[in-house]
Image: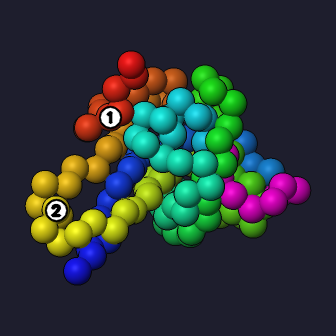
Amino acid sequence: MLITLLKSKLLRACVTETRVDYEGSLGIDLDLMDAVGMLPYEKILVGNISNGNRFETYAIPAERGSKTISLRGAAAHMGKNGDLLVIMSFAQVDEKDAASHKPRTITLSERNSKIVKALNPISKK
């Protein structure tokens, strides 16, 4: 049996821009995606800490090192610049492997300027 578990999480990601005139998605700095193993176009669940909205969309890589978190298209109606988000992706894990599964999570500082906490991040080689 497969169980759906948290795979990746960006906590307290600050919205840096909203673009209604763009195809729907969430732009995320590629460095942040890499840190938690989130893939381009991966389905994500987003919780807006600032207003309580929750929505599903997909991750689009934004410029590496830009600190960008960009609500785009329909998702741009779910928040505004400065809102704090929780961005999560999930994986299906075989039941026998579930107990040893460890999600990769990072907590960001103000305006995504640095990672203040990391659990099981992907190390750069």
Question: In the rendered structure, which segment of residues is drawn in magenta?
Answer: 20-27
Q: Is residue 13 magenta?
A: no
Up/down of 56 relative to 19, above or below: below
Left or right of 97 on screen, residue 76: right
Q: Are marks 2 and 1 in contact (CB under 8 Å)?
A: no
Relative to the observer, which residue lies in front, 22 or 43?
43
Residue at image point 48% right, 53% down: 87
Q: How is the image coloured?
A: rainbow
Describe residue 121's horizontal placement relative to residue 99 as left or right. right
**Amino acid type assigned to the residue bearing label 2 in the image:** Asp
Q: Residue at x 32, y 60 (%)?
A: 6
Res 22 seen here:
yes
Q: According to the image, label 1 marks what residue?
A: 121
Around disc 2, counting alpha carbons within 10 Å, would you say few (fewer than 14), some (14 to 19), or many (20 or more)? few
Q: Is residue 25 magenta?
A: yes
Residue picked out by circle 2: 97
Image quarter (top left, top right, bottom left or bottom right) of the C terminus = top left
On screen, residue 19 above or below 75: above
Instruction: Look at the image and tell me in which quarter the N terminus lies.
Output: bottom left
